[in-house]
Amino acid sequence: MGAVRRRAHRPRRLAVRPGHYDARQAEKDAALWHRFSPLREQAAALLDAAETSADQLAGKSGQARWSWQLAHLRGALERVDTAHTEYERVAADPSTSAEDLLAASAVRNKQASEALVDWLTHGRAVLEIHAATVRAGQTGIRLTTRAPHAATPASPARRR
């Protein structure tokens, strides 16, 4: 019997239409911005409080990575603020059309998305610092004013 020749397995390429990925990415960027925006104005004060608490914990139960993570979060916050400042400049112009405002919003979301992902990745350090501070018998991270909660869209069918 002769050798059976098999066809080489080639991965199937998915047909992706050019605008679909960009539209989906724009939705993700907008969702990230929407979720972070209630925290944005309080984020600098939150980082200041976390840095103070981390300094107090420094030899006891502090993690070496916290100072790097907090510095990274501060840099990310600066990038978010820069993107928002550019958006506000466009929004403040009375001649800006609704279409231009929507485009400026999309640009802001896109510019801030990488920094917001950094907050998703490293923001947990603030919670870890708070928990370690409370375990050490201190009051934990406190802000003078509370940040408003993000509005969550109503879902007709919630899974339990």
Image (tube, helix red, strand yellow):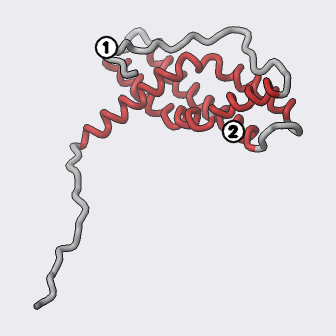
As drawn, the residue found furthest toward the right would be 59
Q: Position of residue 70 (x, y in %)?
A: 71, 34
As drawn, the residue found furthest toward the left would be 1
Cα distance in 3D space between marks 1 and 2? 38 Å
What residue lies at 61% left-to-right and 12% top-to-bottom? 147
Numbered badge on residue 69: 2
Q: With 60 as the anchor, is 82 left or right in this view? A: left
What residue lies at 36% left-to-right and 29% top-to-bottom? 27
Q: How many marks?
A: 2
Q: Quadrant of the C terminus?
A: top left
Q: Position of residue 29 (x, y in %)?
A: 42, 30
Residue that carries the numbered disc 1 in the rendered image? 156
What residue lies at 41% left-to-right and 9% top-to-bottom? 94
- Disc 1 is placed on an element classified as loop
Q: Is residue 144 above or below residue 124?
A: above
Numbered badge on residue 81: none
**Residue count near mark 1 (Cα–Cα under 10 Å), binned few <14, some 14–19, many ≥20:** few
- Disc 2 is placed on an element classified as helix
Q: Amino acid at mark 1?
A: Pro
Give the quarter of the image for residue 52: top right
Residue in the foreground of this view, choosing between 13 and 102: 13
**Eye-nearest disc, 1 or 2:** 1
Q: Position of residue 50 (x, y in %)?
A: 75, 27
What residue lies at 59% left-to-right and 19% top-to-bottom? 39
Residue in the foreground of this view, choosing between 42 and 7: 7
Q: Is residue 11 above or below residue 66?
A: below
**Residue count near mark 2 (Cα–Cα under 10 Å), binned few <14, some 14–19, many ≥20:** some
| Mark 1 or mark 2, earlier in chain | 2
Give the quarter of the image for residue 46: top right
Q: Amino acid at mark 2?
A: Gln
